[in-house]
Image (spheres, helix red, strand yellow):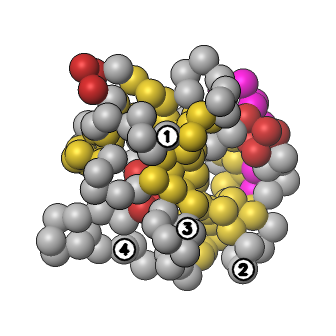
C-alpha cells in the first residue's frame, strides 16, 4: 500500500479531453512535480486515488499534470478542487525484478503479432485471480485474467505488457 501521502497542491482546473490537471502548488512545492511518475488525488490523505502521470510541466507557482490513458476522462472531470498528494516514502523496486499490479496501470497491452489491444485502465482483485481491465483504442473494455497463461512478459521500461492467445480467457464488452 503506497503512502503516507503528503499534500502538495490543489487541482484548479481540469481538461478531461487531454487528461490534464492544472494544479495550484502549495508553498514552494513546484519542484515536487519534476519527473513525477505517480500522483494521489482525493479530498484528503485517507481517500486518495493513485494515478500514473504521463507528463508534468511547471510554470511559476502552478503545474500541469497529464495523466496516463489508464485514467478515464470522466474521472478527470470529477477531479476539480481535489487535493494533490505524493507518496512520502517511495516504494523500492522488488529485488527479484518483478512488478507490482500498480506498475501496470496505464501500460499498453500488446497481443500476438504486435497488435495493440489497449491500455490497462484498472486492476481488479478477485478471489480466484486478478483481472486486467483494458480500455480498447476504439472505445470499449476488455477483461483479461492476470495469469501466466495470458501474460507472457512485462517490459516496464517500454511501457508494454505482452499477452499470448487470449481467446479462451477474454471477456469483451461487445460479446
Q: Which residue is mark 4?
A: 91
In which image quadrant can residue 20 be found? top right
The answer to whether residue 102 is above or below residue 114 is below
- Secondary structure type for disc 2: loop
Q: Are marks 1 and 4 in contact (CB under 8 Å)?
A: no
Q: Position of residue 21 (x, y in %)?
A: 69, 40
Alpha carbons under labels 1 and 2: distance apart: 34 Å
Foreground residue among 126 and 154 = 126
Alpha carbons under labels 4 and 3: distance apart: 20 Å
Q: Residue 57, labelled with which disc?
A: none
Q: Residues within 10 Å of mark 4 (few under 14, many from 20)?
A: few
Please report the residue visible at 42 percent of the width from the left and 61 percent of the height from the top: 101
Q: Position of residue 136 (x, y in %)?
A: 56, 27
Q: Which residue is mark 3?
A: 125
- The numbered mark, 2 or 4, whose residue comes first in the sequence reads 2
Q: Position of residue 57 (x, y in %)?
A: 52, 37
**Magenta span:** 10-18
Q: Residues within 10 Å of mark 1 (few under 14, many from 20)?
A: some
State left or right for residue 47 relative to residue 170. Answer: right
Please report the residue visible at 50 percent of the width from the left and 78 percent of the height from the top: 1
- Secondary structure type for disc 4: loop
Please report the residue visible at 75 percent of the width from the left and 30 percent of the height from the top: 15
The answer to whether residue 136 is above or below residue 70 is above
The nearer-to-camera label among 3 and 1 is 1
In which image quadrant can residue 172 be found? top right
Q: Which residue is mark 2?
A: 46
The answer to whether residue 1 is seen in the rendering is yes
Amino acid at each position: 500500500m503506497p503512502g503516507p501521502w503528503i499534500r502538495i497542491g490543489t487541482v484548479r482546473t481540469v481538461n478531461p479531453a487531454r487528461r490534464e490537471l492544472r494544479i495550484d502548488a502549495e508553498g514552494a512545492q513546484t519542484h515536487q512535480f519534476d519527473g513525477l511518475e505517480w500522483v494521489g488525488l482525493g479530498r484528503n490523505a485517507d481517500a486518495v486515488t493513485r494515478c500514473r502521470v504521463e507528463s508534468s510541466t511547471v510554470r511559476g507557482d502552478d503545474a500541469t499534470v497529464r495523466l496516463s490513458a489508464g485514467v478515464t476522462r470522466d474521472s478527470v472531470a470529477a477531479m476539480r478542487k481535489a487535493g494533490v498528494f505524493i507518496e512520502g516514502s517511495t516504494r523500492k523496486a522488488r529485488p527479484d525484478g518483478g512488478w507490482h499490479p500498480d506498475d501496470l496501470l496505464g501500460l499498453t497491452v500488446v497481443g500476438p503479432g504486435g497488435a495493440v489491444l489497449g491500455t490497462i485502465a484498472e486492476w481488479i482483485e478477485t478471489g480466484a485471480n486478478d483481472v486486467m481491465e483494458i480500455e480498447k483504442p476504439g472505445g470499449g473494455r476488455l477483461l483479461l485474467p492476470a495469469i501466466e497463461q495470458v501474460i507472457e512478459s512485462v517490459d516496464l521500461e517500454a511501457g508494454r505488457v505482452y499477452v499470448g492467445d487470449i481467446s479462451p480467457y477474454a471477456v469483451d464488452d461487445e460479446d
